[in-house]
Amino acid sequence: MMLDVTAELIAEWLDELAGLTGSLGDLFNRPEPRVVFAQFVEGLFAELPKKNGWTLSERAGHATGDRMRWLLDGSVWDADQLRDEVRDYVVEHLGDADASLVIDDTQAQKKGTKSVGVAFQHCGLTGGVRNCQTMVMLTCATAAGHALIDRRLYLPEEWTSDRERCRAAGIPDETAFATKPGLAIAMLDRALAAQVPFTWVLADSGYGRDPQLRAWCHTRAVPYVRGVPVDLPLNVCDGLSALPEAVNTVWPQTVVRTCIVHLIRNSLRYSSRRDWAEVARDLKPVYTAVNEEQARVRLGEFAEKWGTKYPSIAGTWERAWSEFVPFLGLPDAIRQVVYTTNAIESLNARYRRAASACGHFPNEQAALKRLYLTTLALDPTGRGRQRWNNRWKSALNEFDLLFDGRLTAGRVQAEQPPTHSLRQPDEKHLNHDRPPQDPRL
């Protein structure tokens, strides 16, 4: 549908914009910044070759850029209050129960090092690493239109770890490092608290890899659509020192998660045997929590009860927290499969014993036969496999969704028939080095 833009329509828009900026006059305690604020907003809508303090000042008829600069850097007004006013205005005019909240970030390239949050980081504008600022944005999108309702500036760790640099830039000392998905979660919480009507949360694969954002949606029963990167593997380790660092060095985008059973076992080392059952029972609410926030509360309750008698147990969980948290973002079906590495460790131990008993193998096929027979010996009747099949199916569905169908793609490819002739070979032509086929595998 084409809109016929006339001079009368433009005049109506200008009147509505003037009414909107005029209604925000309560943000300022003096009339001068109110006037400059209205000129600043009008300049942002104007067709200027460049938009900065000088060009906006020139358009407004100012002799210098001091008044625009003072509005942004010197005058007293509440930017968060302005954010809330804009959000309420958007909800009033575009609000819809079927709206979607869209999470995305944008970058502003910079040349110096003084701009708050500037650092060499990924820049979506260029697709590479640039010296830039990154802002996480929350957009309300409906059938009637879309508009930004919240924003947060991302501060890289090189900023938050340098308090002197933060103070020089006017960043409060209590400001701690937060990931971009963490900033997005804070904005979603704020939208919920303000009762912004919406049904869906949308995000690209940059946020799709974060388990906490997914846990947030699950906890609040919010439908979501998130891109999932195809290079997002999951690694479960048993607490070996330096293993997460080694994995992330080779596969930087791997989600490393610690083994819950090993974490509990390490905790029980610090307690008396007579308290094992009670300690394990009190730790269960920590690893069955629906999100990190709830897990923190449960760990605090555990420390309050056992901290005097066994102070090292809570410390064990704190030290493993970064590898424990990804577990909380997994669906329950996957949690039941990956909460421990005991099963794979037991299988590897049986493989090692079987290989050691033979001493040596004449060729690779002989070794594979030995491992194949060892695997069959674990479940000679096949009943165990059927029982595990029932547990695995629900987890398989969740894995397939989480990893963007890669498990299904690999399984379909493996099940495709060979491309060579399907003629049945004679018995004398059979390759007897191949392990026997079992209908249960």
Image (spheres, helix red, strand yellow):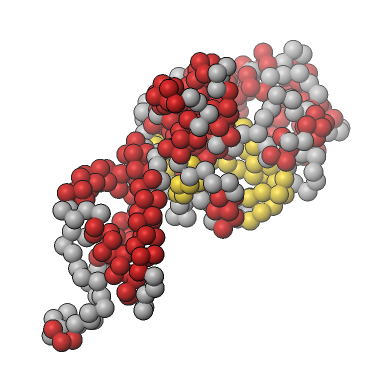
Q: Residue sitting at 39 percent across and 31 percent down?
A: 218
Instruction: Give the residue drawn at x 68%, y 16%.
Output: 27
Pinpoint residue 353: horizontal percent, then vertical percent.
Answer: 37, 59
Of residues 367 and 54, which is closer to you in this image?
367
Q: Identify the residue at image location x=48%, y=30%.
A: 268
Q: Is residue 438 above or below residue 17?
A: below
Placement of 285 over or under 236, stated as above or below: above
Residue 254 x/y as whole percent: 51, 50
Viewer-closest of 334 and 284: 284
- Res 34 quadrant in image: top right
Residue sitting at x 32%, y 69%: 368
User: Is residue 273 among what the camera can see?
Assistant: yes
Quadrant location of the C terminus? bottom left
User: x and y percent of residue 221 in the render?
Assistant: 36, 28
Residue 198 in view of the camera: no
The answer to whether residue 358 is left or right of residue 417 is right
Give the quarter of the image for residue 319.
top right
Up-down relation of residue 375 to residue 393 (above or below): below
Q: Is 28 displayed left or right of 220 in the figure?
A: right
What quarter of the picture does the N terminus occupy?
A: top left
Q: Position of residue 171 (x, y in %)?
A: 75, 28
Frontmost residue, 138 versus 400 = 400
Q: Nearer the viewer, residue 319 or 216?
A: 319
Number of numbered discs visible in the structure rendering: 0
Q: Is residue 65 left or right of residue 432?
A: right
